Image (cartoon, rainbow, N blue to C red):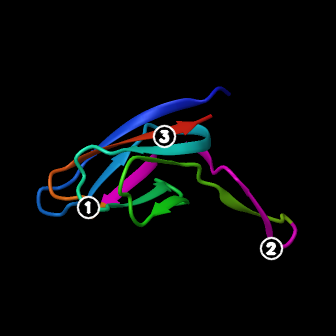
């Protein structure tokens, strides 16, 4: 599968400084997530999960400027569930990716690009 991308623009609430956006359903590995700084103020936080399974993909406590992340999930042994100390991209099987932003300023906009394949 060739890498593809989806762009998600999130506008925060007028009173909350928080907002949530979603990709369309995707199939494949989440390869990277890019934040393109727009009008968010301060240092917003970002939590990225898969919508249905609530699998955590990425959690960033402070985004001061545009950045890219290549999130990875810890791999466990199939026999006993112990960690292998290796990481691989998070797999998504037809779920939407949920991006939740907080502390971004009231009525502000930010853009995210999710690359998968």
- Residue 95 showing in the rendered view: no
Q: Is residue 62 left or right of residue 68?
A: left
Q: Which mark is residue 114?
A: 3
Sequence-earlier tag: 2 or 3: 2
Q: CA distance from mark 3 to mark 1?
A: 23 Å
Task: Name which residue lies at 36% across and 39% down.
Answer: 8
Q: Residues within 10 Å of mark 1 (few under 14, many from 20)?
A: few
Q: Which mark is residue 78?
A: none
Q: Which mark is residue 82?
A: 2
Q: Which mark is residue 42?
A: 1
Look at the image and say whether residue 81 sits in the magenta stretch.
yes
**Percent x, y for residue 72?**
64, 55
Q: CA distance from mark 2 to mark 1?
A: 39 Å
Q: Residues within 10 Å of mark 2 (few under 14, many from 20)?
A: few
Quadrant location, the N terminus: top right
**Percent x, y for residue 75?**
75, 61
**Percent x, y for residue 63?**
38, 58
Label 3 secondary element: strand
Figure disc tally? 3
Residue stretch in magenta: 79-101
| Majority secondary structure of magenta residues | strand
- Residue 112 showing in the rendered view: yes
Label 1 secondary element: loop
């Amino acid at each position: 599968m060739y890498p593809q991308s989806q762009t998600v623009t999130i506008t925060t609430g007028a009173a909350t400084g928080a907002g949530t956006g979603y990709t369309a359903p995707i199939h494949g590995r989440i390869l990277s997530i890019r934040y393109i700084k727009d009008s968010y103020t301060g240092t917003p936080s970002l939590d990225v999960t898969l919508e249905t399974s609530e699998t955590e993909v990425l959690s960033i406590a402070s985004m001061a400027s545009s950045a890219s992340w290549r999130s990875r999930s810890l791999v466990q042994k199939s026999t006993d569930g112990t960690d292998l100390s290796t990481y691989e991209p998070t797999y998504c099987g037809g779920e939407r990716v949920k991006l939740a932003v907080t502390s971004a300023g009231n009525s502000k906009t930010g853009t995210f690009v999710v690359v998968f394949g």
